[in-house]
Image (cartoon, rainbow, N blue to C red):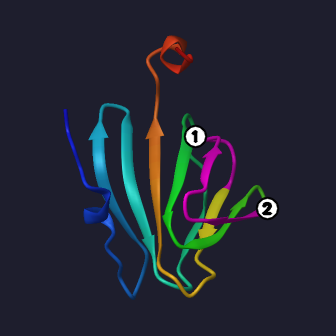
């Protein structure tokens, strides 16, 4: 078992957004993206895996396949690997996003119990 405090991964840089890895194991990883006001994540895809995003603090706008989605603290998103994804901190606040990229061993792990 590993335990981490997410606040330890909230590190901001005036020059560019930061990415801080929380866990990396096998085909899965989780990390925190941190954005100062005006910073952006360029458009990209994640072939072969879905992206789970949780807004830890702040607010901003995702552009997913050319559609803008405004988000704020505690919003969660699921973006498929084939969708074109970008993010912009268009606010005056710092923004932190918790991101998970993973693969499940089989469908049984994704069932409600």
- Which residue was labeled with disc 2? 66
Question: How many marks can you see?
Answer: 2
**Residue 47: which numbered mark, if any?**
1
Asked which secondary structure carries label 1, the reply is loop
Question: Which quarter of the rendering shows the N terminus?
Answer: top left
The residue segment tinted magenta is: 67-84
**Residue 35: which numbered mark, if any?**
none
Confirm or deny contact between disc 2 and disc 1 (CB under 8 A).
Answer: no
Up-down relation of residue 5 to residue 86 (above or below):
above
Percent of width and height locating residue 113: 52, 14
Sequence order check, earlier mark of 2 and 1: 1
Number of other residues with Cα within 10 Å of mark 1, as a class: few under 14, some 14 to 19, many 20 or more: few
Q: Which quadrant of the view contains residue 24? A: top left
Asked whether 81 falls inside the magenta stretch, the response is yes
Percent of width and height locating residue 40: 56, 75
Residue at the image point whose x is 64% and y is 57% from the top: 85
Image check: 45 left or right of 34? right
Front-lying residue, 73 or 54: 73
Q: Which quadrant of the view contains residue 26? A: top left
Residue at the image point whose x is 37% and y is 54% from the top: 31
Image check: 3 left or right of 13? left
Percent of width and height locating residue 93: 52, 83
Up-down relation of residue 95 to residue 56 (above or below):
below
Camera-side mark, 2 or 1: 2
């Amino acid at each position: 078992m590993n335990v981490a405090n997410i606040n330890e991964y909230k590190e901001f840089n005036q020059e560019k957004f930061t990415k801080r890895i929380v866990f990396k194991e096998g085909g899965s990883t989780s990390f925190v993206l941190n954005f100062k006001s005006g910073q952006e994540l360029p458009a990209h895809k994640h072939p072969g895996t879905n992206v789970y995003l949780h807004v830890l603090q702040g607010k901003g706008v995702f552009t997913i396949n050319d559609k803008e989605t405004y988000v704020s603290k505690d919003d969660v998103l699921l973006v498929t690997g084939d969708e074109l994804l970008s993010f912009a901190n268009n606010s005056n606040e710092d923004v932190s996003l918790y991101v998970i990229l993973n693969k499940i061993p089989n469908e049984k792990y994704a069932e409600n119990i």
